[in-house]
Amino acid sequence: MIHTLKDIYGQAAVDAQAERYRNAAAEFESMFGKKPERFFSAPGRTEVGGNHTDHNCGCVLAAGVSLDVIAAVTPTDDGIIRIKSQGFPMDTVDPADTDIKDEEENSSAALIRGVAAGMQRRGYKVGGFSAYTTSNVLKGSGLSSSAAFEVLVGTILSGLYNDFKVSPVEIAQIAQFAENIYFGKPSGLMDQMASSVGSFITIDFKDVTAPVIEAIDFDFEASGHKLCIVDTKGSHADLTPDYAAVPSEMKAVAQYFGKNVLREVERADVVAHIPELRERLGDRAVLRAMHFFADSDRVSKEAAALRSHDFRRFLTLINESGDSSYKYLQNIYSSAHPEQQGLSLALNLAEAVLAGEGACRVHGGGFAGTIQAFVPDHKLELFTHRMESVFGKGSCYVLSIRPFGGTEVQL
């Protein structure tokens, strides 16, 4: 659970990352009056396959990315956790008090308290520490900055007080517990799991208490492509009903068959009862169920393509996932705001530049926000220029797949 800068970021980024960590150490010293003793990092994540499948116990392909949140840390003897995040006030949390605080809902303090409480519920030790954190995980980008922060706190507590005996899977589950119960957001487990485990991973959520996670050994750097996330600058305001309708409509189809989630239903049974389902639930619910079955099944095919180094097949499957999301899941724009279709426009522009190469799809929850594209190296400059000419300078982020999840960092 300890890796060097070269391990985490690659040789080309070592100097820039070393400067970043030195700056964090200097901020820590100015804040707490002493030098930090240790450093930690947790990555953002990208969903690669399985769009909106996790909440119905399906399968997901995800990966940790090169953007991360880092912390300069020193343990303390007073039992209090103090975290100063760049650009935000200091959070001071007594982990001995595990009560849910209404006034902390939707705050980083709630996440810290929730992670500490989750650790203690599982029998792990919790103690005090001071930390300064800084993040380049883009908020609102679908890269899950909150999950990275939760995983960072869990990794710090695992390293400082538990000799790294808390597994990455447990840290992810604890992070989800903190976000669901203390922060007040009913998120699935994918974000936290990808951040905690890192690399390409498949996650089978058939049993949400014990998801099956498999790492995929694939050298993305050798693929001749870059992973681009394009921020269309669309607002997520007033989109809560759109997001909530996706899992609820899928589960409504499952409930027609007396089940809780679509994973417990056979696709053939849905097909056989389409007339009745249309009448009771409407066409969109049926289409979203069809997307669930196809995109969940597609994950194993995507993983197999990576393991066999058939990157062309992998890209074909990514495009199929994007096509299914657009036509059947229908999470590219809000039907209440048809004039706002930044994702549709970004996908159109991406397809024109890629011209049969690479792949593109919606990224994350959809309706606004970002698209994901696998861009051939020889088209990267043109792709970036085209996207930024429409969505603004800095809207196209070129990422790499990070081989590690939450970890201590050796400078």
Image (cartoon, rainbow, N blue to C red):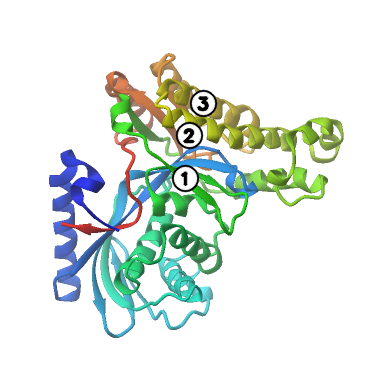
Q: Is residue 258 above or below residue 31?
A: above
Task: Tell me the kind of residue under disc 1.
Answer: Glu
Q: Is residue 345 visible from the viewing direction of this image? A: no
Are dots 3 and 2 in contact, CB under 8 Å? no
Residue drawn at point x = 37 percent, y = 67 percent: 165
Secondary structure type for disc 1: strand
Secondary structure type for disc 3: helix
Foreground residue among 399 and 348: 399
Q: Is residue 119 left or right of residue 403?
A: right
**Picture quarter with the N terminus:** bottom left
Q: Which residue is mark 3?
A: 317
Task: Tell me the kind of residue under disc 3.
Answer: Leu
Foreground residue among 379 and 204: 204
**Badge 1: residue crowd in 10 Å (few <14, some 14–19, many ≥20):** some
Q: Is residue 176 visible from the viewing direction of this image? A: yes
**Picture quarter with the C terminus:** bottom left
Task: Tell me the kind of residue under disc 2.
Answer: Ala
Q: Which residue is mark 2?
A: 303
Q: Which residue is mark 1?
A: 214
